[in-house]
Image: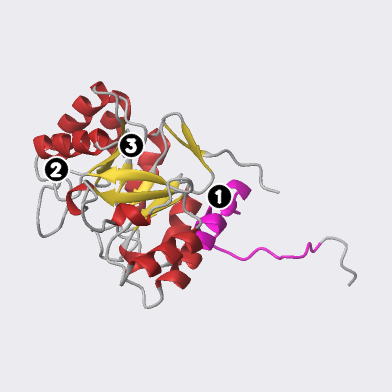
Amino acid sequence: MVNDSPLRLGEREFRSRLIVGSSKYPDFITMQKAWEASGAEIITVAIRRVNLDRTQESLLDYIDLNRYTILPNTAGCYTAEEAIKTAMLAREFGLSDLIKLEVIGDQRTLFPDIPATLEAARLLIKEGFIVLPYINDDTIAAKRLQEMGCAAVMPLAAPIGSGLGIRNPYNIRIILEQATVPVIVDAGVGTASDASIAMEMGCDGVLMNTAIAGAKDPILMAEAMRLAVEAGRKAFLAGRIPKKLYATASSPLDGILG
């Protein structure tokens, strides 16, 4: 039995360290089955892309609120003002005071606009939101955001939807060394080994969407991601052996009879 603490975001605690998205699935039924296979407790939803008033079929109709926590996100926002309004709208419709803050700075790369993210985060925290900002692997931005009161920092592993895995593990390691809040890798995971590597490094969680929804078999990939996150976390807690240039015998040589 592994003695592990829960993932804590604000005053909320979660057993699963895998957060999953809600777009790009071939259909709603596959999406629901993938969520179940993933073991996730948090589902992130792009507020600007869902029908909030429920006058027509909505993604929200397929989320069991007794089982999952909705994490609204501000995907598609390119200014601090847009992101703030979107977060306010999500709370007005009673979705959550949790918010995944995204302010995009470039349409092609979808890299975040860090100054705008800092601006939006500052105001949303003042308004009582539990802010989880999407950032690049910028160690200074991560430090500033946690100092102002963000509940976590969410550096990308690689560009959104790229599936490239962690491209700059050294910056992620620095962010982890400086962290006083959970560090959740967000964007760029492609397969189970990417998720496991993030967790083995000491990240507190992984958020992904395309890697599961875009797989040939989303349900099977969701299960693989669950196992990878769990294995990576256990490996981190267990403590790996140090890397060495030369061999070390697995069996002690002392006492061997000549």
Can you name the residue that lies furthest to the top here?
126
Q: Calculate the distance from the C-alpha at mark 1 to the C-alpha at mark 2.
A: 32 Å
> Most extreme residue toward the front, as rendered?
55
Seen in the picture, residue 244 relative to 3 is either above or below; the reply is below
Instruction: Kindly identify the amino acid type of the residue bearing the numbered disc 1.
Output: Phe
Residue 80, position as x, y percentages in the image: 12, 36
In this image, 230 relative to 136: left or right? right
Residue under label 3 = 96
Q: Residue furthest bottom?
A: 216
Asked if 104 appears above or below 258 in the picture, the reply is: above
Q: Secondary structure at mark 1?
A: helix
Tally of marks: 3
Give how far apart the Cα atoms at labels 3 and 2 are: 24 Å
Residue labelled with disc 2? 113
Q: Where's the C terminus, which quadrant? A: bottom right
Per the rendered image, the range of residues in magenta is: 226-253
10 Å crowding of disc 3: few (<14), some (14-19), many (20+): some
Q: Which residue is mark 1?
A: 236
